[in-house]
Amino acid sequence: MADFLSQVTDWVRETEGRIKAAFQESAQRVIEDMQRRVPVDTGFLRASLQVSNTVPVPADRSANEGTAYTYNPNAAALVIAGAKIGSTLYASYTAVYAARVNYGFVGTDALGRTYNQQGRHFIELALQRWPQIVDEVCRDLQSHVTGSR
C-alpha cells in the first residue's frame, strides 16, 4: 500500500508541475504575442509593459524625447515564474498614450491635442488567441513528456 501511495503522490506532483508549466508558458506566450503587435516608433510603448501578480500598474509614464527604449522580457518572465496556478497576472502598458494606441481616439485630449487615431487592438488580438496558445503549449509539453508530437 505504501508503494501505491508513493506512486500516486509522484503522479500528483508531476501533474501539478505540468499544469503550472502550461499556465506560465501560456502567459509568457500571450505577452509575447501582444508585444509583437505593438506599433513601434521610439519603442517606449513596448518598453512600458509591466507585469504584476498583485495589481495592474497605472498608465502614468511619459517618454523622454530622443531616447531609444528597449523592452526587457526578463522582468515579465520573473513575475510569471513566481505565479501560482490560478493566480491573476496583470500585463499593463504604462505609457500614458497606451489606451489611445490600443483602442483608438477621435477628439481633443485634455492638453488640447486633436486626434483621429484608429485603434490597433494589440491587446485584444493577443488575448483572443489565449485558447489557441494554451493548446499549443499543452501539445509542446506533451511532446516533451512522450517524445512525440
Image (cartoon, rainbow, N blue to C red):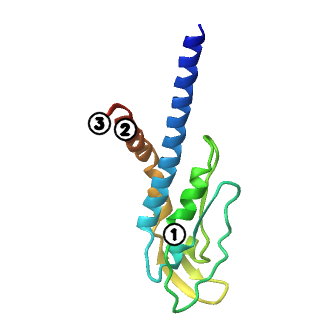
Query: Circle 1: is it few (<14), some (14-19), or many (20+) Cα within 10 Å?
Result: few
Numbered badge on residue 126: none
Given residues 104 and 130, the one toward you in this image is 130
Tell me residue 38's x, y (percent).
Answer: 45, 70
Tell me residue 83's x, y (percent).
Answer: 62, 48
Please report contact status of discs 1 and 2: CB closer than 8 Å, yes or no. no
Distance from label 1 to label 2 (Cα)?
28 Å
What residue does disc 1 label? 72
Q: Secondary structure at mark 3?
A: loop
Q: Secondary structure at mark 1?
A: loop
Q: Nearer the viewer, mark 2 or mark 3?
A: 2
- Residue type at numbered disc 2: His
Given residues 2 and 40, the one toward you in this image is 2
Please report contact status of discs 2 and 3: CB closer than 8 Å, yes or no. no
Name the residue rendered at 42%, 47% in the picture.
Answer: 133
What residue does disc 3 label? 149
Instruction: Count up the numbered dots.
Output: 3
Residue ranking furthest to the front: 3
What residue does disc 2 label? 144
- Residue type at numbered disc 1: Asn
Tell me residue 138's x, y (percent).
Answer: 41, 38
- Residue type at numbered disc 3: Arg
Distance from label 2 to label 3 (Cα)?
8 Å
Residue 148 as seen in the image, left or right of residue 125: left
Name the residue rendered at 53%, 63% in the picture.
Answer: 74
Dot placed on the residue nearer the N-terminal end, 3 or 1: 1
Residue ranking furthest to the right: 54
